[in-house]
Image (tube, rainbow, N blue to C red):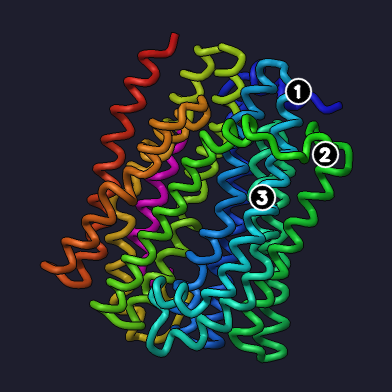
Amino acid sequence: MSTHSEELGTAPVPALLRKQAIPAAIGILTLSVNGIIDNIFVGQYIGSLAIGAITVVLPITFLIAAIGMAIGVGGASVISRALGAGEKEKAFRTFGNQFTLTILLSVIFVVLGYIFHNEVLAIFGGRGDVLPLAHIYYHCLLPGVPFLALVMMLNNVIRAEGEPRQAMITMIIPAIVNIVLDIILIIILDMGMLGAGIATMLAYVASCLYALFFIFSGKSEMRIHTKYLKLEIPVIKDIMSIGSVTLARQGVVSGLAIILNNALFAYGGEQALSVWGIINRMIMFANFPVFGVTQGFLPIAGFNYGARKFDRVKEVINVSIKYGTVLALGIFALIMIAAPWIISIFTNESAVIEPAVPALRWVFLATPTLTLQLIGAAYYQALGKARPALLLTLTKQAFFLMPLLLILPTYFGLLGIWISFPIADALTAIVNFIALKRGTAQMA
């Protein structure tokens, strides 16, 4: 049986963080490049309204798929600590419950998504000329959402057992599949929005199949057995004590999407939705190195906390913040300099390019604070401390950004929407820094 998880408690922290973070970052990069290229195909071959349609639909599908992410993150936290403490039976039982719970809940919510499709699209800002294209994309994506939920769950577990390379591959596969299918369905077969939706849906399926292949290949430390698949209330509570943090965060992200999409439409119409669609894709793409550091941080901190190696926990915090901040500064400089060129890649419509350039710069203005925003919440998540992890995770979107989006546009119009982002980022970084200092000071 593989013992890769043992390295989390013995290998030098800087090298270990690089080993965990680089594959995670590559996986995130590939996934975000997939999103970028998807938007480029859609924007160049269907039109900027199609970008607006994707902007409406993706928060809905990711809200459902976030069930799998929440179960994955929560279970991965339990599994990391269980492996660190040598409790493999607990890890297996947790994984089995994750598997059953993810499939059951995602299928239920997809069915509800079909039943209430008109209401859901309207809530998330689907209106005007964007709505017909949003309907097409939405109905294409929904069948693939349970597969996306399952791969989000499995990806976190694979990383928790010390297999970051395999987790990376599960994120690379859908990007490759989606790009190839975009070329065939959108360009060659001229299927428009229908082709874009089918390509993305099949990419989810391909990613899931690979993750399942790895789990059942015998190379994984995890085991699927019928006795572990039966849902157990104590195990579910253990999973969701931390998983609820991710679910709440995605719920808030979706609530934010509702407020943001409707505000964008009110103050800038379909054009503003398209501008945000471009910027939103760039957030994941540009910040992938810092997200990778955070993903790499989680299993190391969780394992060593479970093994009561607190000095290593503190070391990985310091190393992660140092690496992440240097990377964030580079991202900031690149966006500020190259904003016009970046926007022009997505569309040649001057009506979209002109407002998108300053908007992109505003949204990325506080990027140097990104690492502090992420590591603070990730620290408590890795340790299994649900309440502070939840509060810190919700700080930016719920406590700062949503109120700012409701207040500032009434005074500054569309500009008020864009300046809300750096203000929320800066305030969130301060709160996370204070929480992190207090948390590490109390570590015995």
Residue tagged by mark 1? 88
**Residue shown at the point (54%, 25%) measured from the top left:** 301
Q: CA distance from mark 2 to mark 3?
A: 14 Å
Q: Residue at x 36, y 60 (%)?
A: 256
Residue type at the position of mark 2: Ile
Identity of the residue furthest to the top in this view:
444
Query: How many angstroms separate mark 3 from mark 1 (CA)?
Result: 21 Å
Q: Residues within 10 Å of mark 1 (few under 14, many from 20)?
A: some
Residue 390, image x and y in percent? 41, 38
Query: Which mark, residue 224?
Result: 2
Q: Is 422 placed above or below 323 here?
A: below
Quadrant of the drawing holding the N terminus: top right
User: 132 or 278, which is in the foreground?
Assistant: 132
Residue type, numbered disc 1 = Lys
Q: Which residues are magenta?
A: 323-342
* Residue 356 makes an appearance in the image: yes
The earlier-in-sequence mark between 3 and 1 is 1
Mark 3 highlights which residue? 102
Q: Could you tell me the amino acid type at mark 3?
A: Thr
Q: Are marks 3 and 1 in contact (CB under 8 Å)?
A: no
